[in-house]
């Protein structure tokens, strides 16, 4: 992951864009890009197959979300990989298999 972050920093710095990358603006950008990803699926029925074109467009939008999130976490000093591992561990405690298997409810309703 560090190689990707370095590459992203280089891309940003070569364009002098860090000045535009406040935590607020990066968080907003994550949300906007996530909405663009969601828009690809907005009016599709559950029965519609995922076409190669849809998958390619989703790939681009997912990458945008991921890259903005990496920039946000980098600026805040958050190790995103470590945070994800910690969150999975927390969710394993919050949603034990014995209570949550096949159940789609919030943890406080289990």
Image (tube, rainbow, N blue to C red):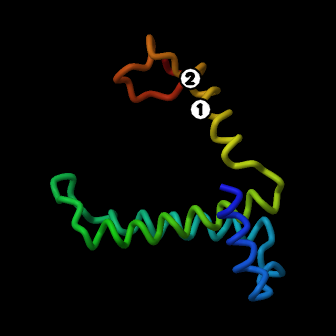
Instruction: Say which of 79 and 101 sits in front.
Output: 79
Specify whether 70 is left or right of 39.
right
Q: Is residue 44 above or below residue 25?
A: above
Read off the residue under disc 2. 92
Q: CA distance from mark 2 to mark 1?
A: 6 Å
Outermost residue toward the bottom in this view: 15
Q: Quadrant of the N terminus?
A: bottom right
- Look at the numbered disc 2 and give the secondary structure of its residue: helix
Q: Residue at x 70, y 64 (%)?
A: 5
Q: Is residue 3 above or below residue 90?
A: below
Find residue 43 and report its horizontal and vertical position in percent.
27, 65
Find residue 36 and report its horizontal and vertical position in percent.
46, 70
How many numbered discs, if any?
2
Q: Mark 1 and mark 2 in contact (Cβ < 8 Å)?
A: yes
Q: Residue at x 51, y 63 (%)?
A: 34
Residue 88 circle label: 1
Instruction: Say which of 14 and 41 sits in front.
Output: 14
Q: Residue at x 47, y 69 (%)?
A: 61
Specify whether 103 is left or right of 68.
left
Which of the 4 image quadrants contains residue 101? top left
């Amino acid at each position: 992951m560090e190689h990707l972050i370095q590459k992203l920093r280089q891309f940003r710095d070569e364009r002098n864009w860090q000045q535009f990358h406040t935590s607020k603006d990066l968080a907003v950008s994550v949300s906007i890009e996530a909405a663009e990803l969601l828009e690809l699926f907005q009016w599709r029925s559950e029965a519609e197959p995922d076409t190669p074109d849809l998958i390619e467009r989703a790939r681009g939008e997912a990458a945008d979300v991921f890259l903005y999130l990496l920039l946000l976490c980098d600026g805040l000093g958050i190790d995103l990989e470590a945070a994800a591992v910690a969150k999975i561990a927390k969710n394993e405690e919050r949603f034990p298999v014995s209570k949550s298997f096949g159940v789609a409810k919030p943890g406080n309703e289990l």
